[in-house]
Image (cartoon, rainbow, N blue to C red):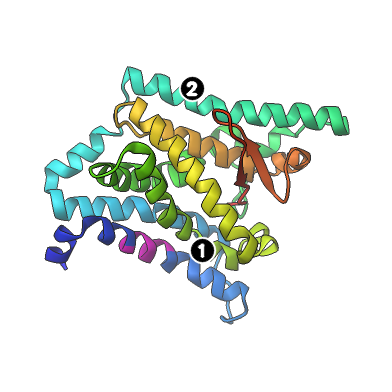
Amino acid sequence: MTSWTRHHPLLAFYVLAYLVSWAIELPLAAARQGWLPLQPPYAMHYLASFGPMVAALVVTGVTGGSSGLRDLGRRLSVRRRALTVALLAGLVPLALFGLAAIVEHISLGTWPNIALLGDVDFLPPLGIAGAVVFWLLTFGLGEEVGWRGFAQPRLQVRHGTTKAALLASVPWALWHLPIFLYKDTCLAMGLTAGLPMLLVSLAATSIVFGWLVDIARGNLWPAILFHGIFDLLSASNAAEPTRAFSLTDTVTLMPSDRLLALPVIKR
């Protein structure tokens, strides 16, 4: 297995990321579908976010040893340029949420309840600060160390940033498949409608994240911050009224000159 991993590091990463995350999510899906007599705690769902990071660390350790792990760690260092790009990236979902709140106020006469941002499904109230840290450490850090920290650079060896991002988006989207068997919003959407939407939206997201990481010279914090804050805002109950700004549980984003629909997955 060690020899195979060294010869096929990218494939080994994808296989291990799926195995780790799906080992956590498939029991939740089986219970929700009535295939298991017991219901595991839904809080397990958040542990699945660390599958890509675990896979990246293991495969990097096998193929690159301690020097490879140090290189990966340097992509998480806090540097001035990376911090500037990260802060700007984090402002994008905040601005979109603010725009949605304004539309809500104009159309419905109400404002989102910001206090609800501190509520995370299946967990005790964390408070807004606690929720921010939680989302950054789970689906922000846990995913991006793998998708942008490991997969994207290896794909860019043979492809440019945009093509590599598009290629990386397919296994990233398929990694989400189990949630269509147990998450309420995804069950309501259905796999037939939800998967194509997810493939398109994550292709666009992968390009944006790939560009952000490139601008930050390989640093991962811009993608982590964008990812974590977007999940915080879109998955919170505070976002529920802003669905007037959306269609079928989607939030409309406009990077550059194109409208892109990102499914709001209640993580």
Q: Main secondary structure of the magenta part?
A: helix
The image shows residue 18 at horizontal and vertical percentages of: 38, 63
Number of other residues with Cα within 10 Å of mark 2, as a class: few under 14, some 14 to 19, many 20 or more = some
Residue designated by label 1:
177
Q: Of residues 127 and 213, which is closer to you in this image? A: 213
**What residue is drawn where x is 59% and y is 34%?**
258
> From mark 1 to mark 2, how far is it between C-alphas?
31 Å
Q: Is residue 224 left or right of residue 131?
A: left
Residue 113, by quadrant, is top right
Residue designated by label 2:
88
Q: Of residues 244 and 237, which is closer to you in this image? A: 244
Q: Of residues 267 and 104, which is closer to you in this image? A: 104
**What residue is drawn where x is 66% and y is 31%?**
97
The image shows residue 156 at horizontal and vertical percentages of: 28, 42
Q: How many marks?
A: 2
Q: Quadrant of the N terminus?
A: bottom left
Q: Which mark is residue 74?
A: none
The image shows residue 266 at horizontal and vertical percentages of: 62, 51
Q: Is residue 134 left or right of residue 123?
A: left
Which element type, helix, strand or loop, lies under badge 1?
A: helix
Which element type, helix, strand or loop, lies under badge 2?
A: helix
Residue 130 inside the magenta-drawn segment: no
Magenta region: 15-21
Q: Of residues 102 and 125, which is closer to you in this image? A: 102
Number of other residues with Cα within 10 Å of mark 1, as a class: few under 14, some 14 to 19, many 20 or more = some
Q: Is residue 143 above or below residue 188?
A: above
